[in-house]
Amino acid sequence: MKKISKRQWFNFSIWAVLYLFFSIWMENLWLLVGLIVIADIFLTKFVTWGSWKKAKNPKVREILEWIDDILFALIAVYIINLFVFQNYQIPTPSLEKSLMVGDYLFVSKLSYGPRVPNTPISFPLVQNTLPILNCKSYLEWPNWGYKRVRGLGTVKRNDIVVFNFPAGDTIAINEQNPDFYNLVDRDGRANVLANKDRYGEIVYRPVDKRENYVKRCIGMPGDSLSVVDNQVYIDGKEAFIPENLQFNYYVETDGSVLTEEQFRMLDISKSDRNLVSTYAGYHRVLLSMGFGNDGQISLPVYHLPMTKKALEMIQKIPTVRQVKIEPDFGDSMYPTGVSNYHTGWTRDNFGPVWIPAKGKTIRLDEKNLALYTRCIRNYENNTMEIAPDGTILINGKPETSYTFKYDYYFMMGDNRHNSLDSRAWGFVPEDHIVGKPILIWLSLDKDYGLFNGGIRWKRMFRMVHP
């Protein structure tokens, strides 16, 4: 054996200490076996780790060097993406104007503590499907249970949070919006399962491979939450109102159309500028709201999402005759697919509902079964069935109560009338929490050219605040 130099000992010591701290952080001492590999790389060199460097053909050696660099980069990106931060793009307007479509974010995994991946063997920077090949980007084995290592803090009320979509455990490949459970509630389970030409293959996804969503955490574990006429209440008290909270409004003018300058002043994107008076399908709604005369819609009526500030501005435009908030049409909300229990809850009037907390126990009555069966069965991995005599069996044993294993959260978008959130699909379990957006590093506006307002310079490198 060759004599080991001081430089070798120094390099080994640095990497060994870093790896030791990582193993302690992961709370898995089996990882310490990796110290043997580190010792061999830097000290003993029994395995010729750099044998590719000895290839005689210079072209082969160059190709192998490239492969080595690419593999190192992929491994480094994979580790950073898993345990430190990941890049995320805002795809939908559910949080506008707090976070806007076209915002690119750094999402901190350290803020709440990174999760040990359920599916450790996966392709980096791809959530669940490889582009072009259109196949899974991960192997289903091995599949590890939920474990979160220590982070810098925990989820707090009103945090903006990135999480895996809870109802994304089961997917109809060809029709993913609405989610599978709302799809089954709308079209019938037998029809969805049988009609593969329309709905596609039905697949299951592990927690960490479900789509990433971003919403505001409105309700914490143990809270009693309700929405009354669009106002959120927590334990009977009015909840925090985000600065950029938006609702949909119908706006009637005196015959004039709103100009591009006015829309820019109101900060309303082109996709949200809907002149609904030109669509016959809206006429019945508009007439029921008091727009038009003698059964006719004669003046322009827009359907627009607006913040409080924009609402105040549009009411001062001389050509605007009247502004009315979009009424609650009574759409069915969570829990869906419950045939024997109906809450009557809607988008604007929801609850009160208790948010499950770890270690808390509920009675298994009709209401609680409707609200929490999904938590018990899908998120906490229990079997549950109701025997012919009405006995509730959990994991094969008769039960009259249930104690939750996880904390849960209630998430809502700031664009309240344009957000599919916990009102539609229920609670977010703690094991679905991904991280916290901390920085907008790029913001692109698809309505304008890249050098003609397409880059939102004022939003770049701005910290994300509640």
Image (tube, helix red, strand yellow):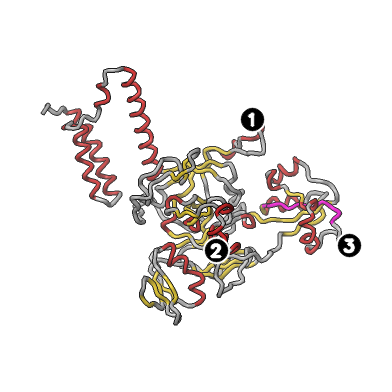
Vertical arrangement, residue 84 with respect to residue 289, above or below: above
How many discs mark residues in the rendered view?
A: 3
Q: Is residue 25 left or right of residue 393?
A: left
Query: Which residues are drawn in magenta?
Result: 297-306
Q: Is residue 245 left or right of residue 83?
A: right
Q: Residues within 10 Å of mark 3 (few under 14, many from 20)?
A: few
Q: Is residue 361 visible?
A: yes
**Disc 2 or 1, which lies upstream in sequence?**
2
Residue type at mark 2 is Ala
* Image quadrant assignment for residue 390: bottom left
Q: Position of residue 197 (x, y in %)?
A: 57, 52
Q: Determine whether label 3 and label 2 are within 8 Å by CB.
A: no
Q: Residue at x 80, y 51 (%)?
A: 278
The 10 Å Cα crowd at callout 1, few under 14, some 14 to 19, many 20 or more, is: few
Name the outermost residue toward the bottom. Answer: 389
Label of residue 190 in the image: 2
**112 with respect to 157 (left or right):** left
Magenta region, mostly helix, strand or loop? strand
Q: Nearer the viewer, mark 2 or mark 1?
A: 2
Report the residue marked by disc 3. 294
Measured in 3D between alpha carbons, the distance from the residue under mark 2 to the one under mark 1, in whole angstroms, is: 51 Å
Q: Where in the figure is residue 7, as x and y percent of width and height? A: 20, 28
Amino acid type at circle 1 is: Phe
Which label sits in the foreground, 3 or 2? Answer: 2
**Mark 3 belongs to which amino acid?**
Asp
Percent position (x, y) of residue 454?
63, 35
**Which residue is disc 1 drawn over?**
451
Q: Could you tell me which residue is drawn at 30 percent across and 49 percent down? A: 25
Q: Quadrant of residue 286?
A: bottom right
